[in-house]
Every structure is written in C-alpha cells, then in structure tokens.
Image (cartoon, rainbow, N blue to C red):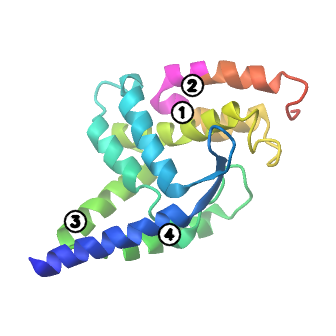
Amino acid sequence: MTDRINAQLAFLTEACRLKSILRATTLCDGSRRENSGEHSWHIALYAMVLGEQAAPEVNINRVIRMLLIHDLVEIDAGDVPIHGNHDSTAQAAIEQTAATRIFGLLPPDQAETFRALWDEFEAARTPDAIFAKSIDRVQPVIANLETDGGTWPAFNVTASQLETRVGSKVARGAPALWVALKTRIDAWFSTPSSSSE
C-alpha cells in the first residue's frame, strides 16, 4: 500500500509542474497570461456550468475528469497556441511520449485508466470527448473577447480562422454555445480596431 501511495503522490507532485506552463491566453482581466493548471481548472468549471449544452448521452463527470488531465502532457510538451504555427504531427508525437511518462508515474491500474481517458479526449470520437473538446475551445475565446481581442491581433487571427479552428469543434459538441459565441465574435471583428479578414 505504501508503494501505491508513494506512486500517487509522485504523480501529484509532477502534476504541480503544470502550473508553470504559461499559455498564450491571458486571464479575463488581461492582467497576465494564464498557466495550464489554471486553464484545466477553469474549463472543468465551464463543463459543470455549461453541461446542459451537451448532448443527452454525455456524462459530465467523465468530461470533467478528461478536462482535468487533458493538458498534463504540456509539462513535457509545452503549450502550443491554436493560432500559432507548428508541426502538428511532431507535436502529437511529443505529447504521446509525455503521456506515457507522466501517466506512467501512477500505479498501473490508474495509469491505464488515466491514459485511456486522455487518449479518448485526443481522439474526440465519443460524445464525452467531443463535448470536452468543445469546452476546451470555448474558454480561450471568452478570454480574448473579454480583453478586446486578447491575443488575436498578435496572431493575426481572422474570423474565418476562428470558424475553422475553433467554431467547427465547438459547434460539433455544443452547437447552441457556438451560435451565442459567434454573435460576440462577429461583433468584435466588425469593429474598426479589430484585425481585418
């Protein structure tokens, strides 16, 4: 039993490192960049609050579990902004290796369960994972809207890019939520100070 607890505590200590991974997205007050630990907590809360937007078969408790662990790989792989330029195949390989190492710190039964949940999120084929991916995309949009575009101008983001990279994912798992967000996004992009298409 002591070995099991020691393994669990080692994993939890390693997970603390996620708080040191800075994301491109700022806090909603624009005061600083958020870290990946804060992001994971915040989108788990988003899932709790917005769970009514999910399809009836979605298990919100499983979604919350996915969201709490989905970015742990960033401890090794770092955060890659959705609107940045990167090699997605190479990044996916780095994240797979990170998942093996990080979840491998747990006792074998938990390592298998956590890894399966992470793999399910990444594949985004089940109703739970589809909704979790949707919520993961919503929170940065809100942060950018709350900070007058936030990082969108720095990344030269256009409304059509948001539709492709974010909207399609959100609409797949939470269509009414995307409709509500799109109204706000369209309003921002129609202002003279926003980046142009």
Mark found first going from the N terminus, 4 or 1: 4
Q: Main secondary structure of the magenta part?
A: helix
| Pair 4/1: label in front | 4
Residue at position x 68%, y 46% in the image: 31
Residue tagged 3: 110
Q: If the image is split into quadrants, where does the C terminus sit?
A: top right
Mark found first going from the N terminus, 4 or 3: 4
Residue at position x 65%, y 48% in the image: 25
Q: Is mark 1 on a helix, strand or loop?
A: helix
Q: Would residue 87 appear left or right of 148 to someone viewing this image?
A: left
Q: Is mark 3 on a helix, strand or loop?
A: helix
Q: Which amino acid lies under the numbered mark 3 shown in the image of this protein?
A: Gln
Q: Is mark 4 on a helix, strand or loop?
A: helix
Residue at position x 26%, y 72% in the image: 9
Circle 2 crowding by C-alpha within 10 Å: few under 14, some 14–19, many from 20: many
From this view, report whether residue 73 is shown above or below residue 177: below
Q: Which amino acid lies under the numbered mark 2 shown in the image of this protein?
A: Trp
Q: Give the range drawn in magenta.
A: 170-180
Q: Which amino acid lies under the numbered mark 1 shown in the image of this protein?
A: Val
| Pair 3/1: label in front | 3
Residue tagged 1: 170
Residue tagged 2: 178
